[in-house]
Amino acid sequence: MKITIFGTGYVGLVTGTCLADVGHDVMCMDVDTDKIARLKEGEIPIYEPGLESMVKANVATGRLRFTTDPEVAVGFGELQFIAVGTPPDEDGSADLKYVLAVAETIGEYMQEDKVVVDKSTVPVGTADKVLATVQERLDSRGVDLKVEVCSNPEFLKEGAAIEDFTHGARIIVGTDSERVKRLMRECYAPYIRLQEKLMFMDVRAAELTKYAANAMLATKISFMNEIANLAERLGADVEQVRRGIGSDPRIGYHFIYPGCGYGGSCFPKDVQALERTARDIDYDAELLGAVEAVNNRQKQTLFTKLSNAFDGNLKGRTIAVWGLSFKPNTDDMRDAPSRTLMEALWQAGAKVQAYDPEAMRECRRIYGERDDLVLAGDRVQAVKGADALVICTEWKEFRSVDFHWLKEQLAMPVIVDGRNLYDTEAVREAGLMYYAVGRGDSL
Ligand code: NAD
């Protein structure tokens, strides 16, 4: 099949590359000329395990191409995927300007019937808006062409995006058109040979499914963080509680790790956007509000613990930070807890020595050169001469540490662990104070 993808971010690039990899002819379009120039050179603008070699291999076969030319892009695919960003607007609702800009482009240049596939995460009712936008352009051009719009939300996780795209639990397509169903079945046929995981539903249900899935996962995290905060105050070890409840198959072990709050480009904005949608229809989504409030509070806890450990005076201190990305195996720092921490530290007059295996470039891009931020070459350099260590991201390379060595490095024997990586007793035996989430020393 000939497929066009608008947007070459995490979702667009992974979608385009994976679809090319199973034999489709794919054209990826982006308005970011620098990004497209780099992609044409075989350089991947994001860090996503396995993606670079896959892009190169598919470019080499000629099945994966890149363009900035909207006319070429629209002319190419019978399916036109929209995979552009939907960042939060000022009021928390999803900003549809990029999605609707693509819809305008499609309406402007299409010369034959097209199916538009909405892969961006968008509020219920957006497919209607996309259709109306394309139709308006067609009408103003005075051409009579057919356009159909379906919803095909994406569930991939950054860091495991290729595996998730190719072996996801389900592929959801919202449409009531038999023609669209046939085309989407053909598009995803390579992934559904072993198991019937293609689910057709109506457009609005598909749009809501994406928000419901992310809101459910965010709820699990905030719930567990709430329990961790209680455990901490009650002298219970939340890791034991986690194992205790996870063993119940109705609860399960997935997604019940306490931590320093969820971040990234999806959970915070999607929970907010769903809440905003609820407000628009005069429904008070109390649970969603609480999920967000608990998360915002949780993201402050690293700083609060550190500040308490230093009797409220962090001025002039140097704090080592291990992990900047919002989770391991990605360079994405959008809404990352590390940012809340670092910004609070700078506000308090402290200096940060940070290390992350992949997000250093992104950190420099966000914060630029500043005297109170040192980007260290590795985890060892980050703790050299530091007063204390904070762990924000559970990268594998932080999991095993010689605590006696660490004690030697730190001026104050303090670890604040936002990911509960270590055995409490082992840390304490080395003479370190260990402030984790829902366990460890109490402050
Ligand atoms: P991103 O910000 O990484 O990439 C978006 C890309 O779209 C950018 O490269 C931008 O230049 C491009 N773009 C903007 N306007 C354009 C236009 N008019 N034509 C062509 N390209 C244009 O975004 P992302 O993380 O890939 O997310 C895309 C969508 O997918 C969002 O709605 C997001 O919520 C959803 N989603 C993201 C993830 C994830 O893990 N990142 C997972 C599932 C769903």
Image (spheres, rainbow, N blue to C red):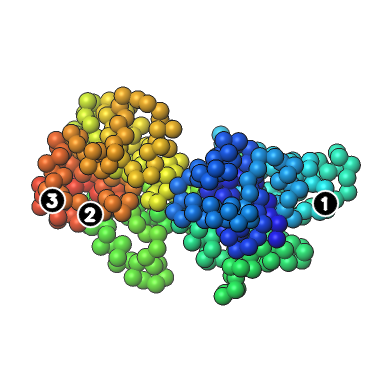
Please name the residue shown 26% across and 47% down the image. Answer: 417
Which residue occupies the extreme front position in the image? 60
Residue labelled with disc 3:
428
Q: Mark 3 falls on what kind of element?
A: helix
Look at label 3 and name its amino acid: Arg
Where does the image place residue 26, in percent across and percent down from the top left? 65, 54
| Rendered location of residue 130, percent (x, y) | 72, 47
> Residue 283 versus residue 326: which sits nearer the camera?
326
Quadrant for residue 379, please give it. Answer: top left
User: Mark 2 — residue?
Assistant: 400
The disc label shown at residue 112, or none: 1
Q: Quadrant of the C terminus?
A: top left
Report the side of 254 relative to 79 (left or right).
Answer: left
The residue nearer to you, when weighing 348 against 372, is: 372
Q: Amino acid at mark 2?
A: Ser
Residue 168 picture location, percent across and down: 53, 64
Ligand 1 within 8 Å of the CB at mark 2: no
